[in-house]
Amino acid sequence: MAVTGAVLVLYLVAHVVGNLKIFYGAEAFNDYAHWLRHVGEPAVPARTVLTLVEVVLAVSVILHMWSAVTLTRRASKARPVKYAARRKTQASGYAVHTMRYGGVVILLFIIWHLLDLTFATVNPAGPAGLPYDRLVQGFAPERWPVTLFYVVALVMLGLHLRHGVWSAFQTLGLANGRSYRPLKIVAVGLSLVLVLGFLSVPVAIAIGVIK
Amino acid sequence: MNFTVGEPLIDTKAPEGPIEDRWDKRRFAAKLVNPANKRKLNVIVIGTGLAGGSAAATLGELGYNVTSFCYQDTPRRAHSIAAQGGINAAKNYRGDGDSVHRLFYDTVKGGDFRARESNVYRLAQVSANIIDQAVAQGVPFAREYGGLLDTRSFGGAQVSRTFYARGQTGQQLLLGAYQALERQIAAGTVAMHTRHEMLDLIVADGRARGVIVRDMVTGEIERHLADAVVLASGGYGNVFFLSTNAKGCNTTAIWRAHRRGAMFANPCYTQIHPTCIPVSGEYQSKLTLMSESLRNDGRVWVPLRKGDDRPAGDIPDDERDYYLERIYPAFGNLVPRDIASRAAKNVCDEGRGVGPGGLGVYLDFRDAIGRLGRDAVEQKYGNLFEMYERITGEDPYSQPMRIYPAVHYTMGGLWVDYDLQSTIPGLFVIGEANFSDHGANRLGASALMQGLADGYFVLPTTIGDYLADGPYGEVDEGAVAEAEIAVRGRIARLLSVNGTRTADSYHRELGKLMWDYCGMERTEESLRKALERIPELRAEFWQNVKVSGEADELNQALERAGRVADFFDLAELMCLDALHRTESCGGHFRAESQDADGEALRDDENFAYVAAWQFQPEGGPVLHKEKLDYDYVKMSQRSYK
Amino acid sequence: MNLTLKVWRQKTPDDKGRMVKYLVQDVSPDMSFLEMLDVLNERLILEGDDPIAFDHDCREGICGMCGMVINGVAHGEQRATTTCQLHMRHFEDGATVTIEPWRAAPFPVVKDLVVDRSAFDRIIQAGGFVSVPAGSAPDAHAVPVKKDDADAAFDAATCIGCGACVAACPNGSASLFTAAKITHLGLLPQGQPERDSRAKAMVDQMDLEGFGGCTNTGECTAVCPKGIPLDTIAQMNRDYLKA
């Protein structure tokens, strides 16, 4: 859980940095997208690095899900009889209780996201469109339900990271009593930065800042 | 109840010679068991507290085939876990003049010259090994910045010999023993039976050969046979119903052994602890001890005037009676446990007690907070204040604590010789269950020391001397069947009464009676009254108790009823012992025997003996006296004025 | 005060069990929670009913034997408190109180509120000790221990083995219990020789018993009567990964 999560978080950081290029204009963004596909050339053929990244990501996602499913199944096996009284959480932090359904929401989102902006099968610009056009048309004001879905999913992602980031340190034995506070602050900060960073693009398009 | 006086009792195992060589001598003289034979020798251990847990673990390590029982769901729950203060040991790490001899001296004197010199000396010798053992097990004793062990002085001792782990020394030591025990369970040398209660001892051909136990989950009556039986079932303070003991603590194991022939020594010696949280109502189920250390800074007082029911804060200083400081100006609030307890009882008897029912005195930190500041007081006693607040709902920073004495420890127990063997061959008794080391009064932080000394170091050596002559062969089936039938009969009888009062309600009444008539202060009159009333109440119990449920299930009502039935019998013997001992000594205060200052007055000429009582089915018990000689400590009268 | 109790009743381990409603009257606010149940049980016995079975012993918060889930919270809502130390003054007159046993597959119900926690003993058996036979110890001052280490070890060692951590954990994990012992012994020099093997054996046994996995929810430490800190689990993970 922790190791695959860490891989995914690192990817998200790179992802958001790339996304923000859109604020430099269409050309900058399309060039960046082009570069992604050709990085490493001519030492390696086109798309080598990108494919490697995609494979690592896919494996991480699958292992992350597999761990989550295993943990959930172990948990329900460990408590076959549920409590009659409504459980009241005693620990601080609501984020921790969103991990499982939040994870499912994020998974659905990723599927949509790939169909929308990677394969562009559900994108108005279509597979032939340039990356910049896919974005601008995908989040056009009249497509607000899509944008809303993105917002919800990204908020879930934020909550997921808020618990996930510090939790990874704990699981890997890298945390101790004194580092809890800084770690949690880092977790909140990182989640906020990522969520805001990711949100800025669709929101900017939806309200017409980027056309 | 009448008694007769029998032959004097002599400890045949005690070696002669200089006191410092006796344990070495005994160890050398004790026969050894061939390692190859140990596996064939079965030992049963009842109880898993400091004594029983450490004994079972150590016997397992030595290679014996051990079977251990406890009534709790795991051995780690035994009530040794609740000991707060610490454990004494003659390490002299402070260089403050402590020594084996001084610990020995203090213990004999503290016991008011009613303990055996040889036993106490051995206890003091072994004490140092206990600390080594516990530290090696990982017991996290308090340490100083230099990394060495911290010690403190405890219970008025003049040297700093008490090792401690915050206020949870008993817990940490017990977990050490528990972990050693679990290690042996994993190794297969100890078979552990939790939720099992011993209900009878099997004695065949004059030897202890096993026990009858009840599986408290299924109700099944089981027989377990062995070459030797070790009782480590703790004290009997719960005869008073309210005590600082755990709810489950009971006398059944030792009482059943007593009825099978093990003599019961000094049953009347009970220790009352002065600083407990008072009773708050009829429903009260137990009393909670507050560490004695509170008296270092708290001042004890009651209103000067009878029936003064103003809140403590509204009573001006000149209308308060700081009675300990008034009566004992030299020691003030730090007088020994029994004196502080009795003084509290006296002012309450005068009608000046505070709180519900007038059974409490104030322990006031106002001056300490004024002098040291709230922070310093919190630093020192924070956890105790919190515990007090949790139980009473009162804030001890803003209003004084209320305290009252409560039964805490029983010095009496089954009689054992120097080898810790009872008068039944093959039956060994260790820890609080025996009578051996504390005389008439136990010093603070000495109970943990004795339990572990017996379990880790003394018993494993001495039991070998007995087992070397084993295995003892087949056990006579007749004896086993007889014990089993007796147990089944008693259970059936309890279930068949079907009366109108619960066992707890009888226990409560018995406890009140014992507290009033055989508690802190005893008189011939009160004891005679108790001896009249106990048989009546017992008869009523057997005719009118209501035990619901069945024998073959988890039945907590049945468990309690069985224990209460045995408490009745024990209570009677306690009162008889208290009545016959017309002197005052240690925890036994006879109002008739006090000096001009109201101090306990011993009668060494007539009572320098251990009173060992032998059970007889008819005609009352037989008293056997074991004379106590003091060659190394001069007998003296204590005074704290 | 008067209360309505909804209590889990289950006659035997195989019985299906159900919640049963009881009215208790004239409850004193100074009663402990268990004393309130005592009073109810006295009544049940006299009515010829089966009293509610519950585990308890020392009633001063240290033996770890008592434990029930009160209104959905292990040991009740008061922090750092065992059930026996919980007092009725924390409840409102007329309230309904739900009382259930610890719920976890490795803690099967024996009867009513009594559960079998022997899984904890087996975790200790797997390695929760220092192998030092009686009489073989060196002098206690032979190895100094840093005060900070001794204090931290003590904090972990105060675990009373009550099982509230398991009861509260949404995953039914025993990580806090196991970690407390691994941390206690792992912080002391005396525990070093067996440190790696201990962590591995204890964690493996914990999994074998059927406890769930830890997802760092922190529910365990929140209900722990002794406030065993969550960083013991990080320590356990560290030692386990190293082993």
Image (tube, coloured by chain):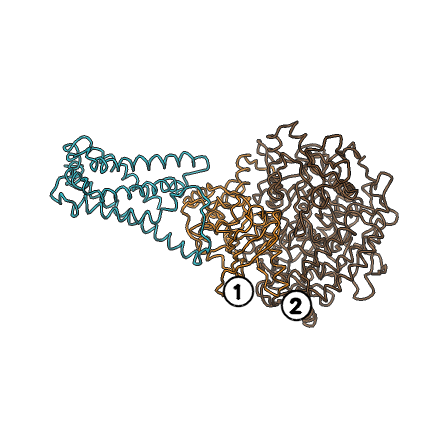
Chain colours: A cyan, B brown, C orange
Amino acid at the residue labelled 1: Thr
Residue C32 lies left or right of residue B27; in this view the side is left
Q: Position of residue B274 (x, y in %)?
A: 72, 42
Q: Quadrant of residue B564?
A: bottom right
The secondary structure type at the circle numbered 2 is helix
Front residue of B623/B286: it is B286
The residue identified by callout 1 is C12
For residue B176, say whether it is visible: no
Disc 2/disc 1 C-alpha distance (Å)? 20 Å
The residue identified by callout 2 is B495
Against B299, residue B239 (above or below) is: below
Q: State yes or no: discs 2 and 1 in contact (Cβ < 8 Å).
A: no
Q: Position of residue B422 (x, y in %)?
A: 74, 57
Disc 1 residue crowd, few under 14, some 14–19, many 20+, Cα 10 Å: some
Front residue of B197/B560: it is B560
Residue B128 lies left or right of residue C232; in this view the side is right
Amino acid at the residue labelled 2: Leu
Q: Write down the chain letter for disc 2.
A: B
Residue at the image position 61 percent from the left and 52 percent from the top: C27
